[in-house]
Structure formats: C-alpha cells, structure tokens
Amino acid sequence: MIRFILSKLLYLIPTFIGITIIAFSFVRILPGDPVLLMAGERGVTPERHAELSAQLGYDQPIVMQYFDFLGRLLQGDMGNSLVTKKPVLDEFLTLFPATVELGLCAIIIATVIGVTVGVFAAIKRGSWFDQISMTLALVGFSMPIFWWGLLLIIFFSGILGWTPVSGRISLLYYFPNVTGFMLIDSLLSGQKGAFASALSHLILPSLVLATIPLAVIARQTRSAMLEVMGEDYVRTARAKGMPQYRVIGIHALRNAMVPVVTTIGLQIGVLMAGAILTETIFSWPGIGKWMIDSISRRDYPVVQSGLLLIAALVMIVNLLVDLTYGLINPRIRVK
Amino acid sequence: MSETPNLAAPVKLSDAAIRRRMLAEFWFYFSQNRGAVVGLVVFVLLVLTAVFASVLAPHDPTTQYREALLMPPVWAEGGSAQFLLGTDAVGRDMLSRLIFGAQYSLFIGIVVVSVALVGGIIIGLLAGFFGGWIDNVIMRMMDVILAFPSLLLALVLVAVLGPGLTNAMIAIAIVYQPHFARLTRAAVMSEMKREYVTAARVAGAGNLRLMFKTILPNCLGPLIVQATLSFSSAVLDSAALGFLGMGAQPPAPEWGTMLAEAREFILRAWWVVTFPGLAILISVLAINLMGDGLRDALDPKLKRS
C-alpha cells in the first residue's frame, strides 16, 4: 500500500510543475507590460518603471523569474492583491470555508439523493419511476445551472418569498468566526434564529450546485447497480433465499459503490466550475466569486495564485479519491 | 433490410453497398432508443431554425422598439401579438433574438468540436503511435490541462486573450482537446496490436498512411460519441462564459449573453430570463439524448446484449 501511495505521489510531481508553469506564464503572456498594467491608468515615470521592474524581478531572464516564483511559492508567498493589497493566500484562506461549506452541502445532497434514486431506478428497471427519474437526471445533466439558479430565485425568493436572494446570513446577526462554516458558527453563537438564517441562505445555492453532480451520480449508480445485479454472486445470494433488502444492501450495493465513489470524487472539478457560477448568482462570498471579481478587476496576482491553488486542490482531492479507490478495491493496488 | 441477398453464395458487395448496410445497421440501433430519435428531431429543427433565421424571425434581433420596453408575452396581460414572446429591457423582440441565438449556439458547438477534435486526434495519434518519451511528454501535458476545472481555465484564457466570442471558442476548444487526445491515444494503442496494422506495415505503408488511413478510421466510434458530448458542453460553457460577460458581447443575441443582460430584471420580467435559458436547456438536452443513442449504436459492447 505504501508503494502504491508513493508511486501516486511521484506521478503528481510533473503535473504540479506543469500547473505552476501555466499559472506563471499566464501573467507573462498577457498582452502588454505587467508593470504598466499594475500601475493602471495613472501610468509611471520611466525611472519608477525601472525601479518597479527590478523590485518585481521583471528585469531578470524569464527562467530565473520562474524559479524565483517557484521558490517564493514553496515558502507560501503568493504575492499581494493589487486591489486590496492583502496577501493572496490570506484572502484565499478567508474565503475558502464559504466555498467548502457550499460544496460539501451540495455533494451531500447530490450523493444522498443520487444514490437512493439510482438504486431504486435499477431495482425497478423499466418502471415509471425509473423512466421519470432517468429523464429528470438527463435534464439535470443538461441544465445551464446559472439559469436554474435564477429560476429558483424567481420562484422561491420572488414569488414565495421564502429564501433570501444573496449572501451567507442576514445582516441582523453577528458572531465571531470560529470554524468559518456559517452553519456551525451560527449554532455555536447561540443566537436565536441565526442558524435558520444561515440555512435559508445556504439551501438554494447548494441545490443549484448539486444539480449536475446529482444527475451524474444517479445515472452512474443505476448503471453500476444493473451491472452488479447481473453477477453470479447476486444470483447465488438470491438462490440461497436471502431477503431482497439484504441482497441489494449487502451484495449488490457494496460492489456497485466502487465506481460510484470514483464518480463522486471526480465531481470536485465540476463543483469548482459550478461554484464560479453559483457564487456569482447568489453573491456567495467564496473562491468562485473571488476569481470572477479578480478577473474583471484585472487583479492578476489573485487570478494567477487562485488558478494555482484551485488546480492543486483538485489534484489533491483526485489523489485522495485514487487512494480510497485503492483501499476499497485491492485489485487496483497491484497494477 | 428486406433485400437480404442469397446467403448461401458468398456475395462480393460493393463499397457503396457495404456503407449502406452499415448505415442501416447504425440506424437500427439508433432508432431503438426513443429519446435519441426525439433528440435528433429537436436538433434538426434547431439546425433549420438557425439556417432560416432571417426568414423565420418576425423582427430584426437588434432593432429596439422604444415604445414597447419589457412587454410581456402575447398570452400574458399587456402582451401584444406583434411580440409573441415579449420584448427585453430595450424593446428588442425576444422571439427574434432567440431564433438568431440558435445560429450562435450551433456555430460555437461546431467550431469548438472541430478544433478540439482535430487537435486531439493529431496529438493522440502521435502519442499512441510513437509511444515512449513522446507519449509521456504529451500525456503529462494533457494531465496538466485536465487538472484545471474546465470552465475556470477557459475563463482565465479568455481573460488573457480578451473577452469575445472567438476567444471564448478558442479557450473552450483548448480545454476540451485533452479528452479527445486521451481517447484517440487509448484507441490507437489497442489497434496497434492488431494484425491488420502489422500487415499494412509489412506491405510497406509509411507512418502517415498507417496513422491516418489504417488506424484512425477504426478509432472513430468513441470519438464520435465524445464529440456529441463535447458539442453539448460547448453550448453550455459558451453560454456560461457569455453569462459571465466573457463570451459573445452585447448586443449579440447569444443566449448566455441575453441571460446576463436580463439578470437585473428577474423579479420584474420573468420572460426575459426564462426563454433564453429554456432555449439552452432544450438544445443541450436534445444533443445529449442524441449522444446516448449514438453510444448505443456505436459501442459494440452494448450491442446484442
């Protein structure tokens, strides 16, 4: 198992270097002079320009600049935002819990509903439940989620007035930031109504973000279950006279879960892309909105480091998924 | 299928006849899937709408009727038969804009898929055919691109290249290309072991001929399925970029861009938000339904099971 983990880790190194090269060259291939770009519309004098170039290292050869960038990166220095002047990493860490909270809620909704629907659709193959749920899954899979979010806002916030339109919690509540997760912090604060407010802010964005993963998981669970239920050991279990729920729950579901777990893990990239859209629609103060705002404000250090951090994150989660997969299914390890 | 020839005697079929047979077989499996046929019909309607947009649209998509701002659809109170689906905030006819929007979506899908497909096939063929360090270098590069969430990478690429439709299409094509490269490589590697490839090599076929004439045609099945899936994702992602202000720029009647313009009116005028999104959903759904049917028809593992 240790060899398996090590080989996976080694495999990641070239990918990680590639990611840093892309994030690094991103600022370099921008049309125009980075110093002028940072100076903005005010412009700079030639002396100040030379001074800034030297200070930021732009007078060095490009390869040296890259190694300098890499060196500072490994020390956790990602530069400062041009707009807020704060270190990029600090900003990332402040906003990150909001995205994690949203993403976790979405993946929980998607997994619980998706697996349940998938299992029942497979058991009742060809029934009206199967047909309707799989049609809905295909609709969900094809959904432009930015539009879906707007529709939910029109219905639940506009017409019914049930949920707020934006933000993480009502401005009426204020409490210290302990975990960064609004649901937990609001409970810890003990303020009446704070938790309900946080929950009502969270529900629509998580539903929107869960839509595509939910559809994917439901379809994948159904086909994995159908495949497993045709296997000999399931037939044997049935022939032994085992009750249906045990055949499904113990023999079929467990084996069908192996590909489903991978599918769930692979949704992290989908979630990050979805978070950009969802957070924009619901003004959710997380990483996705931060990236979009930074792109439109031309805050390049943020865009550069944000890109790098998100890619590294996706890579690490994928590694964890691979490792879990190796744990569940020993056959993979040996290969 | 009724003209089955005499099976007893070996019949030499002409190439055209073989092709007809293959098409007939393909259609047989494709039409088994009811959803796929529905998807195909909707898709054909969409293509016709795009082609005949200027004939079908009752108004010019960019003309602003200042006396009819945010007019509701004809069936709602205050609607007018002049504007069947109502007008937007500057008085443009929604229906006409939606009809012209079909041109954008199909155009984007075709361009993105063609660029990604051609690029991916060439890269995948090189990696799979030559193997060794070429394969290693290429596939590590593909891994790097795949490490980024596709929409995020496309967004950043557009930010670098400058917002606009062309750049959005280039960015999405770059992001999709590794999927085709991987598929091609995997298919090429399994075909390379087959005897017909060795035979062709022994017969003196050069590398280029082996790659493009001998091997590639046998790898097309999964690529076609992936192309349909990418087509629908391209429509979705370009609409998302348009929605974020990074794709087609106003006043282009691109569906995502229309949604972005409509955002501030969501609580006042539901129609400016509902229809463009519905158009995106229907197109993407139709293409995905077709993709499912294509997979059923082209994947030999699923056949006759």
Image: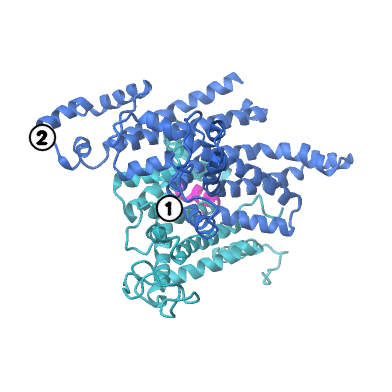
Q: How many marks?
A: 2
Q: Which chain is blue?
A: A
| Residue at left offset 58%, top offset 23% | A4
Q: Is residue B35 magenta?
A: no
**Image mark 1: chain:** B
User: Magenta region: which residues?
Assistant: B211-224
**Looking at the rendering, which quadrant does residue B297 occupy?**
bottom right
B152 or B67, nearer to the observer? B67
Q: Is residue B215 magenta?
A: yes
Q: Which chain is cyan?
A: B
Q: Is residue A69 left or right of residue B152?
A: left
Quarter containing the C terminus of chain A: top right
Pick out the residue farthest to the right: A241
Q: Nearer the viewer, mark 1 or mark 2?
A: 2
| Residue at left offset 40%, top offset 32% | A92
Q: To which residue does mark 2 refer?
A: A45
Q: Residues within 10 Å of mark 2 (few under 14, many from 20)?
A: few
Q: CA distance from mark 1 to mark 2?
A: 40 Å
Name which residue type carries label 2: Thr
**Regarding mark 1 in the picture, which secondary structure is present there?**
helix
Where residue B123 sits: x, y (%)?
42, 42
**Regarding mark 2 in the picture, which secondary structure is present there?**
loop
Name which residue type carries label 1: Ala
Vertical position of residue A1 compared to residue B5: above or below? above
**Image mark 2: chain:** A
Where residue B146 sits: x, y (%)?
46, 39
Pick out the residue farthest to the top: A2
Q: To which residue does mark 1 refer?
A: B240
Answer yes or no: is residue B205 visible.
no
A130 or A231, nearer to the observer? A130
A329 or B296, nearer to the observer? A329
| Residue at left offset 45%, top offset 34% | A96
